[in-house]
Amino acid sequence: MSIRRQHFTAILAAGTLAAALAGCGSGTNATATPTSSLSGEITVFAAASLKTTFTQLAKDFEAANPGTKVKLSFAGSSDLVTQITQGAPADVFASADTKNMTKLADAKLVDGTATNFATNVLEIAVPPSNPASISSFADLAKPGVKVVTCASQVPCGAAADAVEKASGVALTPVSEESSVTDVLGKVTSGEADAGLVYVTDVKGAGDKVKGIPFAESDKAVNTYPIATVGSSKNKELAAAFVAAVTSDKGRKVLGDAGFGAP
Amino acid sequence: MKTTTGYHGVPRWIYAVAAAGGLLVVLPLAAMLLRVNWPQFIPLITSESSLAALGLSLRTSAASTVLCIVLGVPLALVLARGEFPGQKLLRSFVLLPLVLPPVVGGIALLYTFGRQGLLGKSLEAAGIQIAFSTTAVVLAQTFVALPFLVVSLEGALRSAGNRYEAVAATLGAKPTTVLRRVTLPLVLPGLASGAVLSFARSLGEFGATLTFAGSLEGVTRTLPLEIYLQRETDADAAVALSLVLVAVAVAVVGLSYGGRRRTPAAVQS
Amino acid sequence: MSFELQASLQARNFEMSLSLTDHETVAILGPNGAGKSTLLAVIAGLLRPDSGSARIAGRQLFNLDAGTRHWDAPHLRGTALLAQEALLFPHLSVVDNVAFGPRSAGAPKAAARETAQRWLAEVDALQLADRKPAQLSGGQAQRVAVARALAAEPELLLLDEPMAALDIHAAPLLRRVLKRVLKDRKAIIVTHDVLDAYMLADRVVVVENGRIVEEGPTRQVLERPRSHFAAGLAGLNLVGGTLGQEGITTPDGRVFAGQHDPDWSPVPGQAGVAAFPPSSVSVFLGDVHGSPRNSYAVTITDLEPHGDQIRVRASAGTDGTLSADITPAASADLGLAPGMEVRFVVKSALVSVYPA
């Protein structure tokens, strides 16, 4: 029965896509040196693009400090800020941009000052076969090329706007998605010829997409700040986690995932 | 219907639980109402992007409602009146979008009508591109809204029974005449409320559209997608647009219920 | 022969063959579930039998015999069906309901309405033309339904208990209308009411268990019933047996003496029936002295008022149920109650005997 097969295909497809979005698990096995006699539990609110790296970092941290527990919550940076200001129990906040960290600081919820721990730049993602033969940022403006970007309202869209402005190349995207994962999804499914996403997204997608770096990307470098949340009940452990992220070992994990140094 | 006796048979405590249920729905709406930035309300909802989204939502919902009627009426007829192997299976599949997360519907549509999809490849070869077009929005909305029309109409057809149709046939009416002059007029209230529900469901459609159609102002960014996007930067605009959507939904549901309640009175006048 | 049908449908234990001459109205009588409605549905094309065939005036309605699968859809048959309920289309006015048939046959709207007005006048319902069905009484609706069926100019009109859902005040008017319009018309009317059979039908067909058990001119069937059902309708007790010189002998050896037509001499051994009205039966307690003829030991099953009499129903063993009508005073004197064993005595002068 054709309806049944079609449906079955859809379920298979959904599974495949979910696996792709989850990204390839990091094989890094960094061993952290034991620090002090830390204990207790903290909750880390981190930008969605940090999911893979922070999951790894939290695991390493727990291994290095027996008796500690790091709970993770991932979402869009602006959602996380809203949740924290509404009283969500966060001890550490890692944002995908400085704007949202400033928002939290303005709400007097940042303990001390935030530390920039990583940068991220845009990259062109194309399907592995690169059907539209994209090799530069200017190629995205060729007629007939289906480009998907983020909407200006979200950070990856703002970054795309900045690159456009600096390079003088005007894009006419077929869709302006509200999240970078939606852009990536349109590329992995082959609907779009190219999408503007972050380097880390390309890396995370494995061989589902091909990344094409472009020179103009340095016009919009996204900086990731991290800070202890003012309302934290375990500031010692929170500070230790921030230190672990900004340590050389932490940078290595982030670097492996495509993040740049601050 | 008017209760003719004074006895209701509803225990008092039921009212308390019912009130809790009612509050669960009403309270969040009221909370949202309190957060509306009233001085800026009109400018917020009449901004270029808001009007584009509202206009697109109304157009696509109207189109998908028409599509639901065109495809749903025959489906409901076949399910209610027909007898064929696989009928139960067909019904289950038609109703599936009711319980399926819309994003799953979007993915399924993507692999059907997308560029690499089951039909998409042939359509693309024929020069028809559905991805990132308003057509994709209408398809996504129809996919999720169709069951509402089918369920509502099939119920109406079953409760109307086929006795009028049998009489019409013995009076010499061809099957198509019976359908046009007897069956459809008889189930018109059911068809109307099904269409209204389909329209409302289309208007609220988000997940399947986002997954399948993309988001571009004036082309694929319907009101729910606009709200979702505005929420990132401008909470006031998101709340104002949400209120517009609530108002349209209330109007649509009110229309459907009001229409249904008027029917018996109109017959008796 | 103008209409003939032969059909069988195993799933409903249905097997009948029936024919009507031109201008003939036949009443179908029978208990519930006997297959009356099945018969009409098969003729109208709403139910497909396993095998059989039917034709009207040489035109084949269906033929499922000998490998042929000819089956005309209902709208091609010219067999309008009038059911117990009027089933007027609720969204159409009365006149548009009646115009439905002509419109379906392709008549222009104005002409169809004209035809409708004519038929409405025929059933004394012209003044209702502009009303909606919901504004009609049951009797008015059924008269409009008659007009609607006739306006379709059916070659054969099928009526399925048209009076059954009407109250006793509305039924006589509809019955008069039907008597007028069914005259010289080919029609089959399913009914429970012996009055309908007398007034409307030329011929009666009695069906039981999906089979035709008795048929003949209305008067003959109802006055000389051969089936228990017809006897019940006619208000007669019926006992079957073999004919003898004096009357009939039941299978268990009891003798019913009775009268038979003077110009008819019974052939001994031939199957026959004895019919007698309940009023010809007297009830006694204990043994009866004198003539043991026409006297039966029975067990009372029911007592019920019947006009100004009491009807005593009793089980008579293999002869089924017999009834006696006695006065309430007599019933009280005898102290009758269900379960009592009493003796029924039948006056032989009031017993009719005839071949089964």
Image (spheres, rainbow, N blue to C red):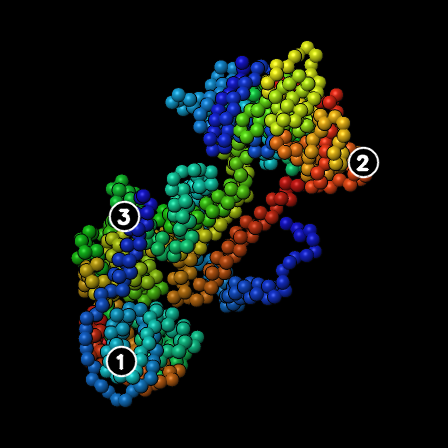
Q: Given this view, does label 3 or label 2 mark the residue nearer the observer?
A: 2
Q: Residue at x 75, y 31 (%)?
A: C288
- The amino acid at mark 3 is Gly
**Residue C301 vs residue B254, the one in the foreground:** C301
Q: Which residue is mark 1?
A: A62
Q: Residue at x 60, y 44 (%)?
A: B263
Do discs 1 and 3 belong to a common subunit?
Answer: no
The chain carrying label 2 is: C
**Callout 1: helix, strand or loop?**
helix
Q: Residues within 10 Å of mark 3 (few under 14, many from 20)?
A: some
Q: Position of residue B160 (x, y in %)?
A: 54, 40
Q: Residue at x 66, y 12 (%)?
A: C264
Q: Which residue is mark 3?
A: B117
Q: Given this view, does label 1 or label 2 mark the residue nearer the observer?
A: 2
Q: Vertical placement of B90 versus C313: above or below?
A: below
Q: Given this view, does label 1 or label 3 mark the residue nearer the observer?
A: 1
Q: Mark 3–mark 2 contact, CB under 8 Å? A: no
The chain carrying label 1 is: A
Q: Which residue is mark 2?
A: C330
C-alpha separation, residue under disc 1 versus residue under disc 2: 106 Å
C-alpha separation, residue under disc 3 versus residue under disc 2: 92 Å
- The amino acid at mark 2 is Ala
